[in-house]
Image (cartoon, rainbow, N blue to C red):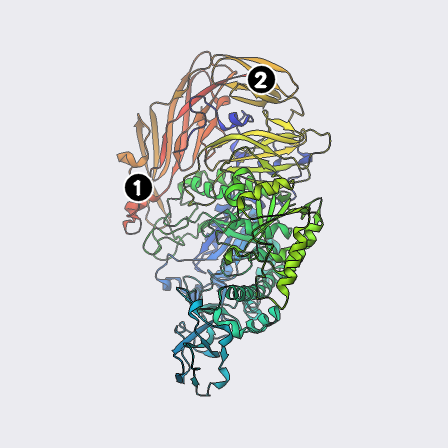
Amino acid sequence: MPVPVGQGDGMSRRAVLAAGATAGIAAGIVAALGSGTAAAAAPSVSGATGPAADWFAAPARSVRPKFRWWWPDGLVNPDEIAREVDQIADAGFGGAEIAAVHHSVKDKSVLDTAHHGWGSRPWRDGVEAALRRAARRGLTIDLTLGPSWPVAVPGVTPDDEAAAKELVHGRASLSAGATFQGPVPPPVHAPAAGVTRQRLFAVQAARVEPAYSTRKETGLDLASVRDLTSTVAEDGTLTWTAPDAGEWTLISYWTRGSGQQPESGPHSAPAAYVVDHLDPAGTAAVTRYWEQDLLTPGLRSLLKAAGGAFFEDSVELETDGLVWTPSLPDAFAKHTGRPLLPHLPALVLSNSNQVFAFEAQLTRQIRHDFWETFSELFNRHHVRALRDWAHSLGMTLRAQPYGLQTDAIESAAILDIPEGESLGFKNLDDFRCLAGGRDMAGHTVLSCESGAYNGSAYSTTWDRFLRTMGGAYAAGVNQTVVHGFSYATVPGASWPGFAAFSPYNGGPGYGESWGPRQPSWHHVADIAAYLGRVHGVLQSGTARADVAVFRQTGYAATGIGASWFTATGVPLGWTHQFLSGPLLDLPNATVSGGRLAPDGPAYKALFVEGDFFYSSTPTLATADARRLLTLAGAGLPIVLLGAFDQPLTPGVPDDGENDRLRDLLTRLLALPNVTRVTDKAAVGDALTGLGVVPDVRHATASTLLNAHRVTRDADFYYLCNGKHAETVKPPVAAIDHQVTLRHTRRTRGGTTIPYLLDPWTGEATRIARYTEDDGDVTVRVALQPGQVMIVALGRPGLFGDRNGARPHVVDTDASEALFDRGSLTIRSTEAGTRTTRLSSGRTVTTAIPSVPAPITAGRWQLDVDDWYPGSAPTRTDHVHRTLTLDTLLPWSAIPELADSAGIGRYRTTIDLPSGWTSAHGAHLELGQVSDTARVTVNGTGAPVVDRLHPVVDVGPLLRRGRNVIEVEVAVPLVNRLRVAQPAVFGAVARQDFGLVGPVRLVPYGQATVG
């Protein structure tokens, strides 16, 4: 249950932050849509004249959230497609990504892939209909590169050059002196369906070395490895006698197609097979299919005009062995100067498990060299090639560049828009990896596939979604692709319509199917506007981060963080991103004024530690060590954690390479701006000793997370009381403490003014209570779990307010201070004289008139629009119910509503005394309410309800005497589905939705200071 701030003293979030505004916001402003212009240029607000700059109050379509739009391949109707585009637009969203996903359809024959498959004429007609209507409505439409995932196109067979491949092994054991005679050991795994050819790549023998064996791996002696490939007879037989000492293993290697199809297929006729992601032939198969089979002149023209993106989902290549491509041996030799074949035993996989190993350090080095080579092929032939092709069509490439053991940080720098996901990412450091690549490359957007929860179909609430995303935004995310919006129906679908992932394996599935089928759709424009405002701020200007963490191995989606920073630094206000070696070759990788990438993230220091992916070994490539020496020589502070006085190369070293590396590190460590520590607890002190401090500071550890953006005019700080991951325990609690924010754009002698940007209402108001010290501003931050506060630091009048640089409050014993219609005002929930100290040095006393005590609402009338399955999967029947409640309870505890879902309108009356005047107001505390809610007072809409802290300032709407308060609540469908579809949803427990309260009206008195 959300804990109302200031129970007993009536303090709202605005009161605690000393920055609220009393006026309500009209619903039209809340849901107002921008023109679709680029957001990155928008927040130069020097010409703003209104109470809130238009770019914030009415965020452009380009920064509003998108939907993952699930189609049943091409079994779609163009008229329905146009209707759904209108639904997305009317709800205030910015676009959609068309994805062929239908895991819920058990009998795929109803999809008729021969006539309505992905890429078919009906699919193209649907895409054109979507693009035409989206252009009319100002939406952006993105397209997945193939059906479902991974990338695949029809016409590629498992045996083709362009198809995904695997290297599998066979093995046979021999004792000393024994002779093997017969067919070469066959693969331990049979080929996948559709694979008709496999080729013997090599045969080796190696002596078993028990000292190198592990629980899963058989140890081998590298010096004993022998290539027997040339001794294999034409009939595939081999005769070989093991030496007289030791146990020996024969290893055969076979290459073949993996036979992988995209998830939950078939999606087309002929069936699509996954392409080779490491070879130009695989990419060419994709682009050729689009060029020759899909991109009609009409579609090509529509795509170019739309300026959308192609999208690739996470790279989930599934093989029984090792993902392979024929060019790997040559690429490995070119990259390392050594042949691959002798090292191959340490690389072979079986069901994702290593099979053989050499001595531990050597094995680590071999695997590092191989996966680095693999990563280069993936980024060159797949990511960069697809990006360049998309550009040739006037489009961009958005992708989730993880799933393989590749440098996803480098991939993020190549992509126009890298994307992560709230489901698969284990903590915020996974996002920080991609953010480092984005920002070092000078790109703007980091996207996120958002809100997929296992087993939560039709029970997902927007507050859960917002709590999940709150932390992701602090880690660099600034675009949300909501998971998702399902096409209306397919043959055999049940009410409330086709859903991509529900049912799933007989249960509710994961991912929500948003849209008009959901009761909360009545309020979803509030959510869309909120997310658009957050995106608009976080896409403005350039990102700032305190520290760059150097990562020798640039994997993502691992949940592996950074020593000290993740556990200790972040709770103290520090921010960090991850860089890998290739990013230090980017044009932005320069140092000025002690900052790395001064025109971008402007890191104040670089942190280097052992490679977490290889037992925290203190490794550096010599090329990277030279780059670090150059950066440090230009004045960048560097902190190294671990035994970097005795570093090792990450890969197999060339002759004398370790000596050259140690010489470079000796020179590096001799510089005055470079510090080495051996205890991670000393990292913070080492940074302080180098003069490095974070932009956000608070005295004690906190769950406060932050992101910092800088424009020409202002510093924007996004502050969220969040957590690192959905599974982090214990739950986040409310916070209330002082926070100091650095103003990096302050001019000498200028005055810094802090503004509060309310992402729910769109208001931008000058904060009335704060302290300033040489441009740094300290404000009070009090946030409920998941709640967000946005502060802008700039010049007087930045947002067109009339308060200029007039004195502000430094300290007061009042509950709240604010600038209200040009006057400095204080509020209090109790009558009396309040003392306020101003920034001018004056101390002022102000009288607060008598204030009524808090009022708990009593009897309620509840009118329910109860939703039921209709006569068709997309039809909903409505039953009206009216109840009188003496006590607020969840619907599940009200017999008449135990299985209900829909819209509830709660109405009560509150009498205010005859002494109520314009010097009074009140906050309405809703207490526990689920899912979305809107409030009206005396027939007028109140400001939008903060879903994570449902307290609304209704002061201007109240009057003496009788006041009618109405709370409209949208209740998710799952309780109705429990009884409507018990085979799928029956095991789900009844959910406690509705207005539970307690609902209180907490009056305050207010008076002008001075």
Q: Position of residue 359 (x, y in %)?
A: 49, 67
Which labelled disc corresponds to residue 836? 2
Label 2 and label 1: CA atoms lie apart by 51 Å
Percent position (x, y) of residue 173?
Answer: 39, 77
200 versus 752 height, above or below = below
Asked whether residue 319 is in view, the answer is no
Q: Is residue 731 left or right of residue 63?
A: left
Identify the mark at residue 557; answer none if there is no mark: none
Q: Is residue 948 visible?
A: yes
Q: Residue furthest left?
A: 895
Estimate how packed mark 1 is, as few (under 14), some (14 to 19) or many (20 or more) residues with alpha carbons within 10 Å.
Answer: some
Looking at marks 2 and 1 on the same chain, the residue that comes earlier in the sequence is marked by 2
Q: Secondary structure at mark 1?
A: loop
Q: Nearer the viewer, residue 644 or 839?
A: 644
Tally the numbered discs.
Answer: 2
Q: Find out whether the residues at labels 2 and 1 contact each other: C-beta distance under 8 Å.
A: no
Q: Is residue 988 left or right of residue 589?
A: left
> Is 568 on the left-hand or right-hand side of 800?
left
Question: What quarter of the picture does the C terminus occupy?
Answer: top right
Q: Which residue is mark 1?
A: 990
Q: Position of residue 98 (x, y in %)?
A: 50, 55
Q: Which amino acid, by three-letter code, is at mark 1?
A: Arg
Of 902 and 275, the residue lying toward us = 275
Q: Position of residue 485 (x, y in %)?
A: 45, 50
Disc number lying in front (2 or 1): 2
Q: Split into 4 quadrants, where in the image is the N terminus?
A: top left
